[in-house]
Amino acid sequence: MQGLAPSSKLSLTVVVVVFLLGMAGAAHGLTRVVANSPDEPCMNMTLYYHDILYNGNNTANATTAAATKPTALATTYWKNSTYFGALMVFNDPMTVGRALPLAGEEPAARAQGFYFYDKQESLTSWFGFSIVFNSTANKGTLNLVGADLMGDATRDFSVVSGTGDFFMARGVATIRTDAIEGLYYFRLQMDIKLYECYV
């Protein structure tokens, strides 16, 4: 690429990356589908994320645990309930309806990843996780990242990729807090809309 202007090098790089991504889908025998408008995603679903924090006594039921010890700065902000600096790791059930799965019943998927509380002034967190599907209906993963601004009625996580039935999917998951029970359980409604799919 000697002799090319920097903008030409960038344009060429973008063309090569787009070509290679298209070839990846073709190699899997899939066709790329891109939604024509925000009102018409190529795939959508609603799932409920159930987070049960470990409280010292619920070992059998807990799906989330703190992965860090509180620091002096974090405990200063824990007093105003922002939990600043706390890192939580989770393996949470996700269901099609609001109810937790019954004993022995498999959830529609599992959310596996982490979130950490990242603001001193208000209760907010940042999530990075995969939704892992392993059922007769779906197999594969969706990978999500984003800020959870808990004071907002709705907030969006980016769907950045996927595998299996969701190979290279991209879209948005709109999050709503559906229930909070004390400090140790909350349920989020996730309306997931995919705008780039391979079928």
Image (cartoon, grey):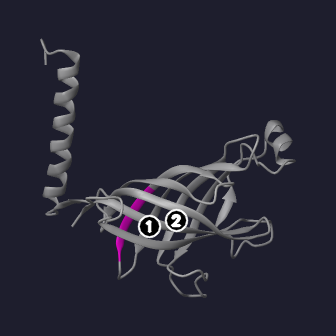
Tell me the amino acid under the disc marked 2. Ala
Q: Is residue 6 magenta?
A: no
Instruction: Name the residue rendered at 46%, 64% in the picture.
Output: 131
Bounds of the magenta span? 138-143
Q: Is residue 139 magenta?
A: yes
Q: Give the quadrant of residue 142.
A: bottom left
**Which of these two is toward me, 50 or 188?**
188
- Answer above or below: position of 177 versus 18: below
Judging by the rendered image, the residue that carries numbered circle 2 is 111
Judging by the rendered image, the residue that carries numbered circle 1 is 132
Instruction: Name the residue rendered at 25%, 59% in the picture.
Output: 36
Residue 140: give x, y in percent of width and height. Answer: 35, 67
Q: For the residue carrying disc 1, how many other residues have a C-alpha within 10 Å: few (<14), some (14-19), or many (20+)?
A: many
SS assignment for the magenta stretch, majority = strand
Instruction: Name the residue rendered at 32%, 65% in the picture.
Output: 40
Residue 135: give x, y in percent of width and height. Answer: 39, 79
Tell me the amino acid under the disc marked 1. Val
Residue 182: give x, y in percent of width and height. Answer: 80, 68
Q: CA distance from mark 2 to mark 1?
A: 6 Å
Q: Are marks 2 and 1 in contact (CB under 8 Å)?
A: yes
In this rendering, would 66 be left or right of 25?
A: right
Tag 2 secondary structure: strand
Furthest residue to the top?
3
